Amino acid sequence: MQRIFSGIQPSGVPTLGNYLGAIRNWVALQADHECIWCVVDLHAITVWQDPAELARNTREMAATLIACGVDPSKHVLFAQSMVSAHARLAWIFNCVARLGWLNRMTQFKDKAGKDREAASAGLYVYPNLMAADIHAYHATRVPVGDDQKQHLELANDIAEKFNHDYGVEFFPHIEPLILGPAARVMSLRDGSKKMSKSDPSDQSRINLTDDADAIALKIRRAKTDPDPLPGDVSGFEGRPEARNLVGIYAALSGGTAQGVLDEFAGSQFGPFKQKLTDLVVSSITPIGAETSRLLGDVTVLDAALRDGAIRASAIAEPIVSEAERLVGFLKV
Ligand code: AMP
Ligand code: TRP
């Protein structure tokens, strides 16, 4: 059976973008894979996180994943900082990856913004830690949203260079799994930006904890254009907001964008948004309710994470120890 690894940052409340681009696919993959799911708190602190909020967000993210259907008993769920193998392998990869490779990473450029000098060194080497997350488990398949593709290519470059430099076939090639019609959900306020839990505007996203009223208001206010919905997907040209809302509808109804247009061609946004609201509310609100229930008893949640970390360590420890030995670290 192929081993799967994926991670999600506890840098805020997870959004509909996280759900459609990642979490929902994770749940489906559990049926026929061995899966390791990680709340990546080491990655989160590459930008400032208030300590109390980070701890709260880490629990909330774990609870949300379980509420969405991640199974912490059949698979492995834990927080990244609980397993030291990640940081140890990341350091080795910091010494394998080349500055030229990191300079090409578009996420760094986006997140660092205009003032690159003020960005943390951690943000710059973020992709090396991500490569370590995956390779510490010899995982070969990695489900992510479209925005992470470049980081996975880098993870393969790092593995190849490590294998070449140390004359081994140790780290396997990994395959990105970018699934579904909503691998890239865009902001409700600007169809050219991805929906993000760290966007300053709460109106730009649907949080998995939003109630029906909040969802209805955000969809009603979502940016659109004055034209009716097109009859064909080619009509989305120059209309990113229309494409996005139809994509969300398609993903949640289990159909395709063309299938949605077959139903709504020529319709104004008003009635379409009403139907979309009903669909989002019925899909999302049960997740919010279950998340609150799980957060009601953190001792159970913490025990699940602790158990996940023990099982994660049992897999990663021999692999990372062997990498350290290959590098020449003394094992006495
Ligand atoms: P992050 O929120 O950056 O920790 O991302 C966690 C996972 O959600 C990754 O697999 C991302 O690719 C995915 N993801 C984040 N935002 C979006 C989005 N707007 N659309 C689709 N997938 C997303
Ligand atoms: N960088 C990913 C994101 O922001 C999260 C992540 C960290 C990840 N480590 C990973 C995803 C390993 C897949 C595999 O979306």
Image (tube, rainbow, N blue to C red):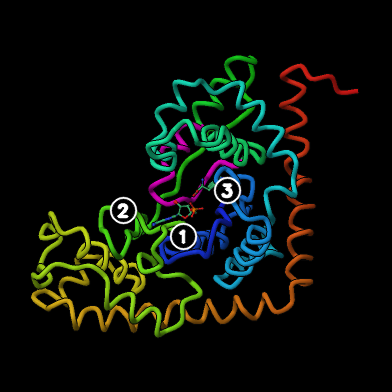
Instruction: Name the residue: 56% across, 63% down.
Output: 31
Q: Position of residue 169 (x, y in %)?
A: 62, 23
| Residue positioned 50% across, 36% down in the render | 119
Q: From which residue to which does the magenta span run?
A: 139-155
**Alpha carbon of mark 2 to alpha carbon of mark 1: how far?**
12 Å
Classify mark 2: residues with Cα within 10 Å, few (<14), some (14-19) or many (20+).
Answer: some
Disc 1 vs disc 3: which is toward the camera?
A: 3
Ligand number 1: quarter of image:
bottom left
The amino acid type found where label 1 is placed reads: Lys
Asked if 241 appears above or below 194 in the picture, the reply is below
Q: Is residue 205 left or right of residue 28?
A: left
Quarter of the view holding residue 274: bottom left
The residue that label 1 is drawn on is 197
The three-letter code of the residue at mark 3 reads Trp
Label 1, label 3: how far apart the Cα atoms are:
14 Å
Q: Is mark 1 within 8 Å of ligand 1?
A: yes
Q: Secondary structure at mark 1?
A: loop
Up the image or down, 293 lies above or below 180; here it is below
Task: Answer with left or right where residue 331 lies relative to residue 289.
Answer: right
Residue 212 covered by magenta stretch:
no
- Ranked by sequence position, the earlier of labels 1 and 3 is 3
- Is 245 left or right of 62, judged from the image as shown? left
Q: Amino acid at mark 2?
A: Lys
Q: Earlier in the sequence, mark 3 or mark 2?
A: 3
Residue beneath disc 2? 193
Which numbered disc covers residue 48? Answer: 3
Q: Position of residue 308 (x, y in %)?
A: 74, 57
Mark 1 vs 3: CB contact within 8 A: no
